Image (cartoon, rainbow, N blue to C red):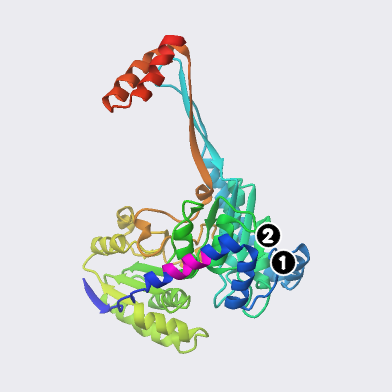
Amino acid sequence: MEYLKKAAARPVEQTEELRARVADIIREVRTRGDRALIEYNTRFDGNGRTALRVTREEIEEARGKLTRQELDDLNRAVSHIRAFAEAQRGCLTGLDNFSNVPGSVLGHRVIPVQSCACYVPGGSYPLFSTALMLIAPAKAAGVERVAACAPAVKGSGAIHYKTLAAMDIAGADEIYAVGGAQAVAALAYGTEQIKPVDMIVGPGNQYVAEAKRQCYGQVGIDFFAGPSEVMAIADDSADPRILAADMLAQSEHDRLARGVLVTTSRSLGEAVLRAVREQLADLETAEIARASWETYGEVILAGSLEEAADIANDCAPEHLEVVVRDESVLPRLVNYGSLFIGQETGEVFGDYASGTNHTLPTVRAARYTGGVWVGTFLKVCTYQRYQPAAMREIAPLVSRMAHGEGLAAHARAAEIRLELL
């Protein structure tokens, strides 16, 4: 393995200070409710509104600002996302009438959580696609109450109209103009205006991620999101201009984003480096894209596709593109958030409208979890029923095992059924 371009080390976060500041915000929201929320909204976003829930009139006004093409695009994208989520939901079925002891019946039910919150970040861009990616699968799962929230546009009391319209198109039941760690705290513990939820999903800045970490247990969460990242595995059959464009598409997210190319071709790697420089020359978002690429972008020369796959599995990237002649390497790839196969399959398609979800694990979390999907909002809950004969067969086994652990009351709970039933 050889680096044609190597990334700088990530900065060490001020974790203790961050944790303390987020803990203060959570405590204030828990104790002071809406008063604290409104104060934080005003301080951080310049949002002085006192009625936090967005009205139907505001939603209709936002939808009215969309062009017919924008409205059609949102509806088409959400239909792809919803259709894929519903197909996934169909794979998750209940289990009935399983028996391992005559007279027993075991099984499971697939049950949606009753309520969830979808956090849609604001930041530098109106990320309305994230609203579709979070809300549509929740509704496809059958979640009864889907609340959505996003920070207001800086200095205003309104969510960006494209994000607000997307939330409504995706099917949100409630929408709140509040963001940051304070929004996570409010949705986890509840305030006068916001009823708490059972689960919170969605990406955000380091304060949102830390608030999700501290509120986990009080509510369920998806995972902790870090900076966006893409990795491409490519041989000399790939077009360097396309790979360069994909690297920059991730790099423009923010200055901490990361694009990585792993290639078996030195000439391709060098061509991609040249193509990135050329495309940056007239890219509208070049300031951010250049900063993240120059700092965290990498081009790695691998000795074989097998070595490239090992590098990818170790990095466990959020997005993984594979552009190679010999696709027999695909089964070797096991750690990634979402896989994009072939040069025609742009990672940006998954960002917006292919139907798969773009809310994916980062910072190597793909080693142990996938991204948000319809199953994120579902619980698989078991049940059992025993007839008398089955009870008489299993109770002695349970009694012996309970005595073996020294749990006499457990054993007695099995034995008493033999005596009385």
Measuring from the top left, give residue 114's x and y in whole percent: 60, 45
Distance between mark 1 and mark 2 Cα atoms:
8 Å
Measuring from the top left, give residue 345's x and y in whole percent: 46, 64
Q: Residue at x 28, y 61 (%)?
A: 314
Q: Pointer 2: residues within 10 angstroms few (<14), some, or many (20+)?
A: some
Query: Furthest-front residue in view?
Result: 31
Q: Is residue 236 above or below residue 82?
A: below
Left or right placement of residue 357 versus residue 332 in this view: right
- Magenta stretch mostly in which secondary structure? helix
Secondary structure under the numbered disc 2 in the rendered image: loop
Name the residue that disc number 1 marks.
Answer: 51
Task: Between residue 336 and residue 114, name the one nearer to us.
Answer: 114
Secondary structure under the numbered disc 1 in the rendered image: loop
- Which amino acid lies under the numbered mark 2 shown in the image of this protein? Gln
Looking at marks 1 and 2 on the same chain, the residue that comes earlier in the sequence is marked by 1
Left or right placement of residue 230 versus residue 266 in this view: right
Measuring from the top left, give residue 400's x and y in whole percent: 29, 20
Task: Between residue 90 and residue 340, name the one nearer to us.
Answer: 90
Question: Residues in magenta?
Answer: 19-26
Viewer can see residue 345? no
Picture quadrant of residue 161: bottom right
The quarter of the rendered structure image containing the N terminus is bottom left
Name the residue that disc number 2 marks.
Answer: 193
Viewer can see residue 369? yes
- Does the magenta segment cover residue 413? no
Q: Are marks 1 and 2 in contact (CB under 8 Å)?
A: yes
Q: Pointer 1: residues within 10 angstroms few (<14), some, or many (20+)?
A: few
Measuring from the top left, give residue 413's x and y in whole percent: 41, 20
Q: Is residue 218 above or below residue 111?
A: below
- Which amino acid lies under the numbered mark 1 shown in the image of this protein? Ala
